Amino acid sequence: MRIATITNWAYGATVCLTIVAGVTMVMASSADRVERAAVRQRDLFDQLTFEIENDLSELTDQARLAAVTDDPSHAIAYQRTLASLGTVEQRVAKLKDGGANEQELRSLEEGLRWAKTLEDEQQAAIAATRRGDDATARAIVFGPEYERELERVRFLIGRFRYMLDQRSDDSIEQASQASQRLRSVSEAMVAITAALFLLVLGFILKRRILRPVMTLSDVVNRLADQDYTVETPAFSQVDEIGDMAHAIRIFRENGLERQRLERERDADWAVRDLLARMTQRLQGCESVSDLFAVVRLFAPEIAPRLAGRLYTLDNRMDLMVCAAEWRGSHGDGAEGRGPRGTDAAFGPDDCWALRRGQIHAPGGEMLDVPCRHVAPSAARATICVPLTAQGETIGLLVLENLAADHGPDESTGVYIELMSETVGLALANLNLREVLHEKALFDPLTGLRNRHELDDTLRRLVATADASGTPIACLMMDIDHFKRLNDRFGHDAGDLVIRTVAAVFAGGAREDDLALRYGGEEFLMLMPGADEALALERAERIRERVAGLDLTHEGQPIGPVTVSLGMAVYPHHGPIQALITTADAALLRAKEGGRDRVVVATQRSRGGGMPVSVGG
């Protein structure tokens, strides 16, 4: 016989047995409900008869207390209790509604009639008490006749309760026996159904289910351990096993996809962390050289498969100059090479990214023009990213994909944009800082340093001089009669004279000397390692060169320009704190002595003293 036929017969028999078992279970449940209803009815009757007995006892007690104590409150309590009770018909009706039969109700009604007789006697006793006839009242409620009637009422109520208990016990017993029989039949049907089911199930398990389930169980356990490399079995049958195999295949594919997404997410977090760290390091850079070092360190980690160069704009020559270069990898973990092509400077017009002001990738999905500064062999794999700040181009990132013949993928492109924005902003801040630093340190008219860092520079030179035992010469220079010249020819001519004299003054300085504009038409030069003779020789040369100038302004000769100079040498002319003051005093003596001359301060004694002039 075929397995399908056996399965169908077994299925039909199981269904029939299950139906029979179900019907018997329903019938057993109905018998249980009958039993529970009988129990509830008996409890209800017990409660009602208890209330009747309790009311009878309470009325008797109140009437006897009223006859014995002469306390009117007991009579009042008696009347209140009596008023709360219903009539005999109402009490009987309440039990009738609960399910009592006619014989039981007749027995109860007889008891209630006798209880009503007791109530009449109780009221007669209370009336006698009110009249002051206490003896009559006590004789009524404590007399033998009253006791006999009270016992008769209790007997009738007890008989009613006994009749109810007998009937309730019989109903409960019958319902319990019926329920037990039906349950036995139901259990037998269930046992037969289970035996038949197990017989067929065992047969089917051996032939169709056991081996596939064991295979699928092993696969599921490995998938539960997130081992998505396991291969799922391919079951061709169209049944639950086939559905399970198909669901497991889908689960495995979803797991592989989830693992891929998690790896991408982890990689994205790692790159964003690198970007955040790079941003923090760029914010701490003190110079563009520090910025280039940070970019060379972080860029290969943010985009490992991209080799690149960082170009900055040289405004003087209007050229993009390579400032940093880094190597990429081919994607297998091994270090690759740098970007193809030369790192020579080129003009901004040679790059389409700089022309358009946006990212240029000729190797994308759309055909585009390659940049002239990129090697032809690397054009399709290269992407150019302009670095801009406040709408002004300040640099360029040129990146080459070493792993493919096209630009970076979309996710890497996002990192590149973030990196370019960060680098561009940091480079703009450093450029602005350098411009502000130059404006703070250099005089815009002459290009010489100003007095901004004079004290720090002087302390540094003194420390070096003290360590090496060499002198430091200080030269102060002032343009003679500058105010007269400025008033005569105007401020433009005055600026021309200051620029020209400053150029001569700076030209007389050595590589290690520091020439600066001290203020107005005054200039200062610090010459470390220069003794008095060398400093005097250079001062005379500067004076002679200035005197030999022939300046004209707007076609009009300005006339001869002369300068006066004062010179002091540390430590010969005093302590370092007074070096500039001593040189300035010597300059003052030179101007008082007729100008156009050099005056050297005299050596001070240990007690101090003013410098004296020498010939010049």
Image: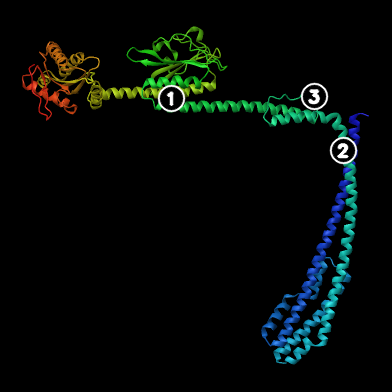
CB-based contact (under 8 Å), mark 3 and mark 1 = no
Q: Which residue is mark 2?
A: 198
The crowd level at tag 2 (other Cα within 10 Å; few <14, some 14-19, many 20+) is few
Mark 2 vs mark 1: which is more N-terminal? 2
SS category of the residue bearing label 3 = loop
Spatial separation of the CA atoms under disc 3 and disc 1: 57 Å
Residue 309 seen: no
Indicate the amino acid at tag 1.
Answer: Thr
Q: Report the residue that reaches farthest toward the top.
A: 376
Q: Judge from the rendering whether residue 244 lies leftward or rightward of residue 603; answer left or right.
A: right
Indicate the amino acid at tag 3.
Answer: Ser
Q: Which residue is mark 3?
A: 236
Work out whether 70 lies above or below 582.
Answer: below
The crowd level at tag 3 (other Cα within 10 Å; few <14, some 14-19, many 20+) is few
Spatial separation of the CA atoms under disc 2 and disc 1: 72 Å
Foreground residue among 555 and 615: 615
SS category of the residue bearing label 2 = helix
Indicate the amino acid at tag 2.
Answer: Leu
Q: Which residue is mark 1?
A: 422
Q: Whole-percent x and y of residue 460?
A: 26, 24
